[in-house]
Amino acid sequence: MNYKTLIGLEIHVELSTKSKMFCSCKNQFGLAPNTSVCPICLGHPGALPLMNKRAVEYATMAGLAFNCKINQEFKMDRKKYFYPDLTKGYQITQQDQPLCTEGYIEISNGGENKKIRLERIHIEEDTGKSIHNENGNTLMDYNRAGVPLIEIVSKPDMQSGLQAKEFLTNLRETLRFLSISDVKMEQGSLRCDVNINIVAEDDSFKTAISEIKNLNSFKAVEKAIEFEEKRHLEMASKSEKGVKETRRWDESTNSTIPMRKKEEGNDYRFSVEGDITKTVLSDEFIENVRKNLPELPHEKMERFIEEYKLPEYDADILSRSIALSNYFEKSAKLTQDPVLTSNWLLSDVLRRVNEAEIDFEEVQMSVENFSKLLLLVKEKKINNNTGKKVLRTLFEQNFDPEEYVKENGLIQLNDDSQLEEIVNKVLEENPQSIEDIKNGKDRAFGYLVGQCMKMSKGKGNPQRFNELIREKIQ
């Protein structure tokens, strides 16, 4: 029997507002434990919450960017459960009237675009943080309690870990473009849960949905999905449906481990949040948010093609990351050569980024120094090969390339008398190559140029070497 995998994601994103969702406590990562708390976010009796308008604005921005319908009238609800990090005994969230519904995010799927549908984007507050120490004690930090969140829930439209990873990458970069969250998984400002099961193609059999938590990287998401897909297929081969449960990802064993049976919605005993009145957004509010949306990736790609005359593929890659696109534009302005800048970024620089396994925003090489290096190549003060060698060191150490090439004697030889002397010597030592060229074997040109470069210790102008060799042989 053939099966298809169904994958849906639930993504929690902390919003970068100055204050928390329902109080004026500072919303800032890294503060000393329990120093940004008050009676409201600690859930003291009689404390009344007040909606953070900026958080609603940010959530609306996300909804519009992800092609959602913005529901002008919404309410807040209480999701009741007991856990030490939930000081009130309930979480203020949205159940049946979320701010945003429908929508989609596009990913590439075998060369074609695929729309991953969104079920909803709703607003809620974050919980406190449990810290487990080596003595077996659990310490509570409530600085995070009450921080504004949006939860983005997708439809089960993904079929592989690779698709889920690309979906998350596109989602994260769009949120970065919007500047509504720093989306740092290592700090918990972006957290992802996976829902996965498999279904027979004729719908005659399906496994119970597993929810996977404790995923702290996109790579972990991809690996957890691959593990669960295999586990579900093994269950299906034995005609076992399994149970609807929550599992956690264990990095040490590269496997998922059962945590508890999955709660149903009615287990949370949802009720309307009576301390916050129903909210109605005006047409003016939504239109103002729409007008002030920043340039989004697809818009940036179109502008790069039009303004910088870049190929569609190059413009697409450059516009997917706000850090990369900003770096490109700043450098292109300094070099006055967007095509040269794009070529070096997409080949040599991104290769270094991938080898180092870092995000582009972690690149230490300054725009100014990178642009200086490109200008040295463009103005033929150093040749292309020397430039690539300098880039390897520059990427790791970030120095002034102009000073570096002078100190290391890398300035390109452009003096014809010096170049001609080298060419004469190379031709004298390689008579067979001259005969090969006369017999139509043009590959020998490349060999002779290579010998000239070797004799000049890589500092000669390869184009001029080529011209001089042709002139002398002809």
Image (spheres, rainbow, N blue to C red):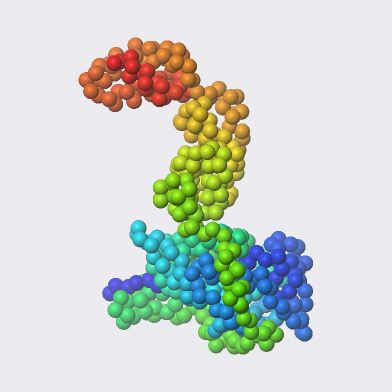
Query: What count of labels does the image hold?
Result: 0
* Residue 469, percent from left and from top: 35, 18
* Residue drawn 47% across the image and 75% down it: 102
The percent position of residue 299, horizontal first and vertical second, equals 48, 58
Residue 324, compared with residue 118, is above or below; it is above
Which quadrant of the structure image shows residue 430?
A: top left
Image quarter where the C terminus lies is top left
How far across and how far down the image is residue 57, in percent? 62, 70
Q: Is residue 427 visible?
A: yes
**In the image: residue 271, left or right of residue 213:** right
Q: Of all residues shown, which one is farthest toward the left?
A: 439
Give me the residue at 55% from left, 88% from top: 266
Instruction: Identify whether 472 is placed above or below 76.
Output: above
Q: Quadrant where the N terminus lies?
A: bottom left
Q: Nearer the viewer, residue 293 or 463?
A: 293
Left or right of residue 61, residue 454 in this image = left
Residue 136 seen anywhere in this rendered image of the structure: no
Could you say which is closer to the camera, residue 139 or residue 365? 365
Percent position of residue 134, x then y: 68, 64
- Residue at the image point whose x is 39% and y is 68% from the top: 159
Q: Residue at x 47, y 58 (%)?
A: 298
* Horizontal relation, residue 36 to residue 98: left or right: right
